[in-house]
């Protein structure tokens, strides 16, 4: 049989080039496509606004300086990571999804030049993730935009005497801890807090404690570590308005005046909003979304049942579980087994030979690790509290950079799980 030309191939389109998207592509190319009848008639396509994948959890430290991490490990070329697969089995498109027509089974892709291409898909995996309110803390657009945001912030940092961070979740606390230690140093062994810090750093949270996913005693420990690097916490207060409005979002280097819902105001030389994330679903029909903007995905199979056959969602964009990297990685083998099953059935295999659906079950035990500066951290795993040293060893040393090499290259998915 002559090899299919790319235009006649059945396209398995994956929207998103981060943990969920890259992992799914590797897994399917290793364990699904090679086992399909007429395997040459399928092509896996990643569509991503960034041509580089990056270790997003590392942003709180990486935003301070390029010297914090080896840049070739922090940012990795997506096309390069797929060079080892057979010619024609993989394609990469740099662009942003602007419209999904799940009935006609097309997705419109806007390129960096502004042109729009309509891509027909045979199967679709939506892994577009979520955007952070601060452009310092994730790939909201592409790698160049993220780097430019860091450059602007770094230029303003040496002159800053006051920094306010809104948000008491991991991103806010990790950013506060990194900036605190970098700018103020750390208090000695026998001091509970750093006296007269060079830079005032304040975390504002609307919750009664920081790190609400962790038990109060662990949150209190984190607050103690923050005090040692000159960071103070304002609880039960929400940022109601920011002047100018662009501060912290469109302009990361702008001074800001923040008005809190308790009537108080805070002046900041630098303002970092780290409150929540927004699912990247603007291109998807509201009929497929939950009230929080995430995709209404089947919590067991990860299919988007309302969208029609062979459409799936994984990662922070989908509602099957709470957003967390470890839960994305747990979902990949389940998602890909179900995609493989659907492809096999559509290729004419009978049900008895492909088995039943794999089922995902979210692990709801207390699991979160939060470094506070370069040597301390708090957290729990599977319901057990972790000592500071272990949080440092697992995450705080390099914010998971030690784990992503195998993930981006596909080695992590060498065996079918």
Image (spheres, grey):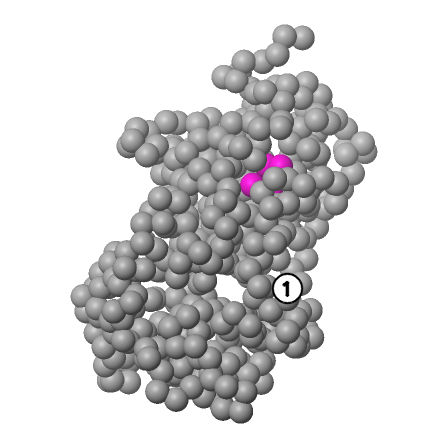
Answer with left or right where residue 160 lies relative to residue 300.
left
- Between 26 and 402, the one nearer to me in the picture: 402
Image coordinates for residue 393, horizontal then vertical, percent: 64, 66
Answer with left or right where residue 222 lies relative to residue 202.
right
Q: Name the residue rendered at 64%, 19% in the picture.
A: 40
Q: Is residue 272 above or below residue 31?
A: below
Q: Is residue 410 magenta?
A: no
Answer with left or right where residue 99 lies relative to residue 263.
right
Could you tell me what secondary structure mostly forms the magenta stretch?
helix
**Residue 227 appears in view:** yes
Q: Name the residue rendered at 51%, 73% in the picture.
A: 372
The image quarter containing residue 380 is bottom right
The residue identified by callout 1 is 394
* Highlighted range, magenta: 22-26
- Indicate the quadrant containing the C terminus: top left, top right, bottom left or bottom right: top right
Image coordinates for residue 306, horizontal then vertical, percent: 52, 44
Q: Residue furthest top?
A: 2
Q: Is residue 247 above or below residue 376?
A: above
Q: Name the residue rendered at 25%, 79% in the picture.
A: 266
Q: Is residue 114 above or below residue 53?
A: above
- Between 218 and 185, the one nearer to me in the picture: 185
The image quarter containing residue 198 is bottom left
Q: Residue furthest right?
A: 352
Image coordinates for residue 406, horizontal then vertical, percent: 64, 45
Q: Provide the secondary structure element on which disc 1 rests.
A: helix
- Indicate the quadrant containing the N terminus: top left, top right, bottom left or bottom right: top right
Q: Name the residue rendered at 53%, 47% in the picture.
A: 73
């Amino acid at each position: 049989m002559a090899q299919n030309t790319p235009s006649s191939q059945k396209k398995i389109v994956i929207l998103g080039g981060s943990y969920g998207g890259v992992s799914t592509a590797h897994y399917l190319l290793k364990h699904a496509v090679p086992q399909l009848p007429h395997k040459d008639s399928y092509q896996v396509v990643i569509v991503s606004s960034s041509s580089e994948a990056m270790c997003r959890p590392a942003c709180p430290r990486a935003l301070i300086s390029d010297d914090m991490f080896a840049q070739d490990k922090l940012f990795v070329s997506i096309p390069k990571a797929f060079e080892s697969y057979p010619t024609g089995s993989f394609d990469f498109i740099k662009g942003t999804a602007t419209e999904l027509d799940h009935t006609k089974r097309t997705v419109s892709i806007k390129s960096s030049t502004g042109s729009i291409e309509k891509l027909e898909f045979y199967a679709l995996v939506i892994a577009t993730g979520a955007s952070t309110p601060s452009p310092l803390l994730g790939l909201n657009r592409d790698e160049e935009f993220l780097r430019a945001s860091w450059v602007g912030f770094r230029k303003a940092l040496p002159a800053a005497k006051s920094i306010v961070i809104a948000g008491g979740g991991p991103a806010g606390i990790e950013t506060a801890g990194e900036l605190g230690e970098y700018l103020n140093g750390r208090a000695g062994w026998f001091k509970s807090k750093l006296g007269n810090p060079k830079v005032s750093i304040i975390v504002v949270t609307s919750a009664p404690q920081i790190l609400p996913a962790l038990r109060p005693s662990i949150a209190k420990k984190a607050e103690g570590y923050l005090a040692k690097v000159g960071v103070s916490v304002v609880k039960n207060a929400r940022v109601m308005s920011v002047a100018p409005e662009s501060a912290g979002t469109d302009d990361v280097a702008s001074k800001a005046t923040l008005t809190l819902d308790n009537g108080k105001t805070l002046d900041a030389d630098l303002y970092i909003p780290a409150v929540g994330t927004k699912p990247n679903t603007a291109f998807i029909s509201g009929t497929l979304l939950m009230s929080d903007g995430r995709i209404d995905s089947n919590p067991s199979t990860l299919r988007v049942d309302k969208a029609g056959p062979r459409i799936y969602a994984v990662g922070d964009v989908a509602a099957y579980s709470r957003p967390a990297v470890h839960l994305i990685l747990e979902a990949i083998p389940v998602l890909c087994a179900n995609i493989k099953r659907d492809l096999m059935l559509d290729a004419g295999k009978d049900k008895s030979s492909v088995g039943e659906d794999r089922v995902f079950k979210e692990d709801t035990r207390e699991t979160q690790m939060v470094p506070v500066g370069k040597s301390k951290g708090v957290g729990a795993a599977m319901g057990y509290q972790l000592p500071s040293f272990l949080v440092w060893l697992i995450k705080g040393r390099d914010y998971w950079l030690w784990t992503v090499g195998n993930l981006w290259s596909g080695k992590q998915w060498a065996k079918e799980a």
